[in-house]
Image (cartoon, rainbow, N blue to C red):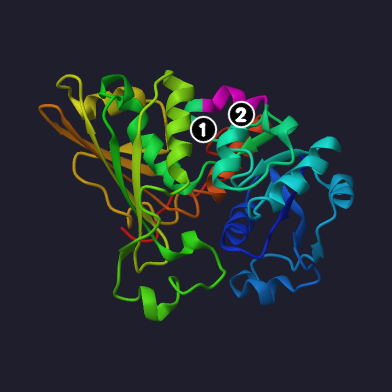
Amino acid sequence: MKKIPVAIVGASGYTGLELIKILISHPKFEIVYLSTTNGEEDLFKLHPSLEKVTKNLDIKKTDPKEIAKVAKLVFLALPHKTAMTIAKELLELGIKVVDLSADYRLDQKTYEKFYCLHTDSKNLSHSIYGLIEYFEEEIKKASLVAGPGCYPTATLLGLLPFIPYIDTSLPIFIDAKSGVSGAGKKLSSTTHFVTINENIFAYNPISHRHAPEIEEKIKQLFKKETQVVFVPHLIPTTRGELVSIYATLKEEIDPIEILKEKYQNRFFIRIKDKPVDTKSVLGTHFCDIFAKSSKKALFISSAIDNLLRGASSQAVVAANLMMGFEETLGIPKIAYVP
């Protein structure tokens, strides 16, 4: 069977590289177009790890009309604001889009409060949130899927099964820690080796823009409003994400049984009987979840690879569903270390 041609716009970043790594061995997709902001770069100079394992595709300057001539689906691994300008034109040309930026994740009012003016409200109104376990059927019919943020992915997968049992009139506290790759390739004072080495610190506490994303999805799925107190931390690792969630229950429950029942048919969710760690998920699409309660206190811990489950592999799973394939097709399943 002939493979479906796909394009990656934004091939120079960490998520772009992970997309390439997944798609070069995907049984149903073939990369036919790579582009960056500048174009005319050498793939192997951009990503030396790919030399001799994939063909040296020409990297072009992004041109939606040229993409539409060769590809059926496009992955946008671009910053917010930039992504929506490309997505709008691609969708008008009849091309399916999986966007890894924040441009189509939120309602317009919330997006503009935390990001910038939105210039594609038409497509925003029918984008589908790419959290597979909760929007699978909608994704199958979608022409535009918005990849969730890495922090919201790990948080929501752990938290959502418990929302019916949580007292949502009280704040939900989230302590999240991520490797430096989550900040992207662009160097800053906080991601400089001298700063992050043997160090850990919080950033944008309480006011971080992933908090409204989490609150919005809780409201969308359960018609409940709650305050999410979200505090992210940068840790001195390349990748991996660990999220700890603290909430107050309305009644005593068996949290492990609730998780097992909710995710019993989900291959990429693993329920653990002890606190989870990042090493066990690095290089995979798995989300490992543990939970424990004492009277009305609830603790939830979830771990993902921020570049894969939190971005690139989640985007490929969405593409699988959009094209009528199985969720697990071509998706990384083996961790880097035991």
Residue found at x 37% / y 51%: 281
Instruction: Please report contact status of discs 2 and 1: CB closer than 8 Å, yes or no.
Output: yes
Residue kind at label 1, given as amino acid type: Ile
Which of these two is toward me, 96 or 166? 166
Do we see residue 192 in this rendering?
A: yes
Q: In the figure, 181 relative to 150: above or below? A: below
Q: Which residues are magenta?
A: 135-141
Q: Residue at x 35, y 45 (%)?
A: 230
Determine the image quadrant of residue 301.
top left
Q: Is residue 40 above or below residue 117?
A: below
Q: In the rendered view, tell whether residue 40 sits above or below residue 182.
A: below
Q: How many marks?
A: 2
Please state the horizontal and vertical placement of residue 247, each as a whole percent of the image. Answer: 24, 33
In the image, residue 140 lies in the stretch drawn in magenta: yes
Q: On the rendered image, what quadrant is the C terminus found in?
A: bottom left
Disc 2 to disc 1, C-alpha distance? 8 Å
Please identify the quarter of the rendering in which residue 273 is found: top left
In the rendered image, is residue 309 in sight?
no
Image position, residue 288 (x, y; %): 33, 43
Q: Residues within 10 Å of mark 2 (few under 14, many from 20)?
A: many
User: Is residue 89 toward the left or the right of residue 296 in the image?
Assistant: right
Amino acid on which the number 2 mark rests in the picture: Ile
In the rendered image, which quarter is residue 171 located in? top left
Mark 1 residue element: helix
Q: Which residue is mark 1?
A: 132
What numbered label is drawn on residue 139?
Answer: 2
